[in-house]
Image (spheres, rainbow, N blue to C red):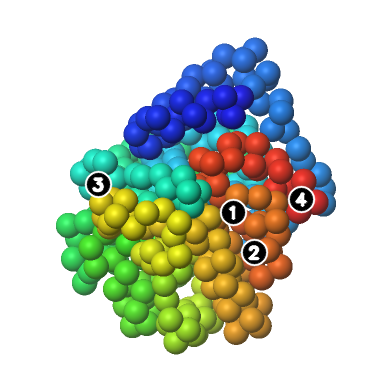
């Protein structure tokens, strides 16, 4: 089915195509007969795929990366594709429009995307209202939290704490996003001092809760080895539950797409095939230099079962996909699970 739709979707603006497909899939899932017919090909589970990571039991290790379902509108429907977990967000305390459109671009020659979305979302209160209706599925949900664009970095911790507290009863784990390249100054929060402060505050806040939920950090693929060493030290010092490696890259080297086309697109984070090896290398460095002392969720350029297995071999406990589905379609999840099994 996706092979037939893909040429038509690629004629559309990338962001419009995303909204069209998610709404169409959501609509069909509300019709019981269609839901069963459409979702039957995606079914594939096996006990060998089950994983227990940071205290959570995952039916399989393949997740949907943050950015696909920014507002928690489609987690019920997307779970029907066979994901073992779904990460929603990035969400901020207040609703914000994000960057001007167009802000999502395909690079077909590289099977990659460039986005500068800018944390467009409806705000944490709207997400909480949707999660209150979490009834139809037991899929594990992660909440990816960030700061509003207008919030200065010295007040950023307040935004993260707001999202953390409001979402706490409605998600299964948290991801602290300080690595998006599309919010001005955000990546400065990856520096050792502000990052240690932010994570320590969140971990201290967790101690006030009756149930302890995992807190992960999502990092950029563009960090130096020295910065990665700092990340490892911070994880150990704060006793963070794990890392997600990696977010999108600002590196444009090695692309097959014409340079003028890339320059005309402008700023944004690159994802997809073009960063497969970069993300895998970061995972391996983190795993090797930490002695495998904490779990890593591997994400970045996974478009086949081999890509997923490479990340697991490098040290990832779980994997996530997004851009790969744009080029391969939703059957990618089943293919990855079969390859891992």
**Comes first in the chain, label 2 or label 4:** 2
Name the one closer to the observer, 13 or 248: 13
- Residue at the image point whose x is 44% and y is 87% from the top: 226
Q: Earlier in the sequence, mark 4 or mark 1?
A: 1
In the image, residue 79 lies at what x, y percent? 60, 36
Q: Please rate how many residues cluster around mark 3, counting C-alpha atoms within 10 Å: few if below 14, some from 14 to 19, many from 20.
A: some
Distance, label 1 to label 3, CA atoms, is: 26 Å
* Residue name at image x 55 percent, y 47 percent: 324
Q: Earlier in the sequence, mark 3 or mark 4?
A: 3
Q: Is residue 232 above or below residue 331?
A: below
Asked whether the residues under the numbered discs 1 and 2 touch, taking CB atoms below 8 Å apart as contact, a structural biologist would say yes
Residues tagged 2 and 4 counted as in contact (Cβ below 8 A):
no
- 173 displayed left or right of 102: right
Viewer-nearest residue: 177 or 238: 177
86 w.r.t. 195: above or below: above
Residue 302 is situated, as x and y percent measured from the top left of the image, at 59, 54
Q: Is there CB contact under 8 Å for labels 3 and 2? A: no
Q: Which residue is mark 2?
A: 311
Residue marked by disc 3? 98
Residue 40 appears left or right of 122: right
Mark 1, other Cα within 10 Å: few <14 / some 14–19 / many ≥20:
many
Is residue 311 at all visible to an observer of this figure? yes
The front one of 311 and 112 is 112
> On the rendered structure, is 58 left or right of 7?
right
Q: In the image, what residue occupies the spot 19% across and 60% down? A: 151
Q: Which residue corresponds to mark 4?
A: 339
In this view of the protein, which residue sits in the foreground, 283 or 292? 283
Q: What residue did someone put label 1 on?
A: 302
Q: Earlier in the sequence, mark 1 or mark 2?
A: 1
């Amino acid at each position: 089915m996706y092979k037939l739709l893909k040429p038509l979707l690629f004629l559309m603006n990338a962001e419009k195509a995303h909204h069209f497909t998610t709404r169409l899939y959501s609509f069909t899932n509300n019709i019981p007969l269609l839901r069963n017919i459409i979702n039957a090909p995606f079914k594939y589970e096996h006990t060998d795929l089950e994983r227990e990571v940071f205290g959570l039991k995952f039916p399989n290790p393949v997740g949907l990366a943050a950015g696909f379902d920014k507002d928690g509108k489609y987690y019920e429907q997307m779970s029907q594709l066979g994901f073992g977990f779904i990460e929603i967000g990035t969400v901020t305390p207040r609703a914000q429009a994000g960057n001007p459109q167009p802000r999502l671009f395909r690079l077909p020659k590289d099977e990659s995307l460039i986005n500068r979305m800018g944390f467009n979302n409806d705000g944490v209160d709207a997400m909480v209202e949707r999660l209150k209706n979490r009834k139809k599925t037991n899929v594990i949900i992660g909440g990816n939290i960030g700061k509003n664009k207008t919030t200065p970095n010295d007040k950023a911790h307040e935004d993260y704490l707001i999202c953390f507290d409001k979402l706490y009863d409605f998600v299964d784990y948290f991801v602290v996003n300080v690595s998006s390249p599309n919010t001005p100054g955000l990546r400065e929060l990856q520096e050792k001092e502000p990052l240690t402060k932010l994570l320590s505050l969140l971990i201290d806040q967790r101690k006030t809760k009756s149930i302890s939920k995992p807190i992960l950090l999502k990092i950029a693929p563009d960090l130096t080895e020295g910065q990665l060493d700092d990340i490892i030290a911070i994880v150990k010092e704060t006793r963070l539950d794990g890392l997600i490696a990696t977010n999108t890259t600002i590196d444009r080297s090695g692309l097959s797409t014409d340079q003028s086309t890339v320059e005309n697109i402008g700023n944004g984070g690159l994802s997809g095939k073009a960063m497969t090896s970069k993300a895998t290398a970061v995972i391996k460095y983190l795993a090797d230099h930490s002695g495998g002392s904490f779990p890593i969720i591997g994400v970045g350029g996974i478009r086949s079962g081999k890509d997923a297995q490479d990340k697991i071999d490098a040290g990832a406990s779980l994997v996530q996909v997004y851009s790969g589905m744009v080029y391969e379609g939703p059957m990618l999840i089943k293919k990855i699970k079969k390859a891992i099994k």
